């Protein structure tokens, strides 16, 4: 099943910021992960190994804060990546979905049909009853 069927005579837009960001995302992810972890590593190295309970609590709080910063950074990079993909698809070639036949596409009606009329028309078309043939378009 081919979900994305390209339309042949379409115009593509020029690439912009989305490709620049897309190419830099691995570096941004790596830097945003490594820098807080390096800072936390330095804090662990510079603290006394026989710290008091208050210092140990502070060090544990720093661990949690850095973990939160790293996870938040990952979610932001993922969000930007999804946005880049959406813009790439939208700027790319045109695609067509499966057609949906509208009963009045060739000759627009002067009045719109009600939901009941549309349901009755669908039922009559499925069952093959003559009511579908009698109805003027």
Image (cartoon, rainbow, N blue to C red):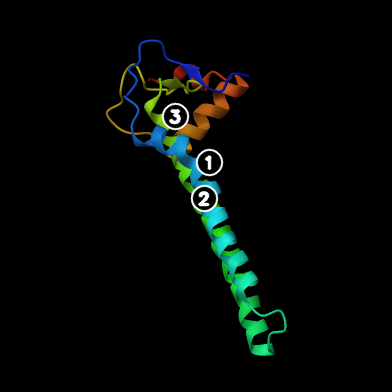
Of residues 19 and 127, which is closer to you in this image?
19
Of residues 39 and 26, which is closer to you in this image?
39
Which quadrant of the structure image shows residue 13?
top left
* Quadrant the C terminus occupies: top left
Q: Residues within 10 Å of mark 3 (few under 14, many from 20)?
A: few
Tell me the residue at 50%/43% (across/down). 27
Q: Residues within 10 Å of mark 2 (few under 14, many from 20)?
A: few
Q: Position of residue 86 (x, y in %)?
A: 45, 36
CB atoms of marks 3 and 2 within 8 Å = no
Which of marks 2 and 3 precedes in the sequence?
2
Q: Quickly name the residue at label 1.
A: 26
Which of marks 1 and 3 precedes in the sequence?
1
Helix, strand or loop at label 3? It is helix
Helix, strand or loop at label 2? It is helix
Residue farthest to the right?
A: 50
Residue 7 - label: none
Relative vertical location of residue 107 with respect to residue 83 in this rendering, above or below: above
Q: Position of residue 115 (x, y in %)?
A: 45, 39
Residue 76 visible: yes
Tell me the residue at 63%/19% (across/down). 1
Tell me the residue at 63%/85% (across/down). 55
Q: Quickly name the residue at label 3.
A: 89
Q: Residues within 10 Å of mark 1 (few under 14, many from 20)?
A: few
């Amino acid at each position: 099943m081919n979900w994305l069927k390209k339309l042949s005579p379409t115009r593509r837009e020029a690439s912009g910021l989305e490709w620049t960001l897309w190419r830099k995302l691995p570096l941004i992810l790596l830097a945003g992960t490594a820098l807080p972890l390096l800072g936390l590593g330095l804090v662990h190295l510079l603290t006394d190994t026989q710290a008091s309970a208050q210092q140990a609590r502070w060090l544990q709080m720093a661990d949690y804060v850095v973990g939160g910063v790293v996870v938040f950074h990952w979610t932001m990079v993922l969000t930007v990546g999804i946005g880049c993909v959406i813009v790439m698809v939208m700027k790319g070639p045109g695609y067509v979905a499966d057609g949906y036949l509208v009963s009045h596409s060739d000759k627009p009606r002067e009045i719109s049909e009600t939901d009941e009329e549309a349901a009755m028309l669908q039922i009559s078309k499925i069952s093959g009853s003559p009511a579908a043939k009698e109805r003027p378009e």
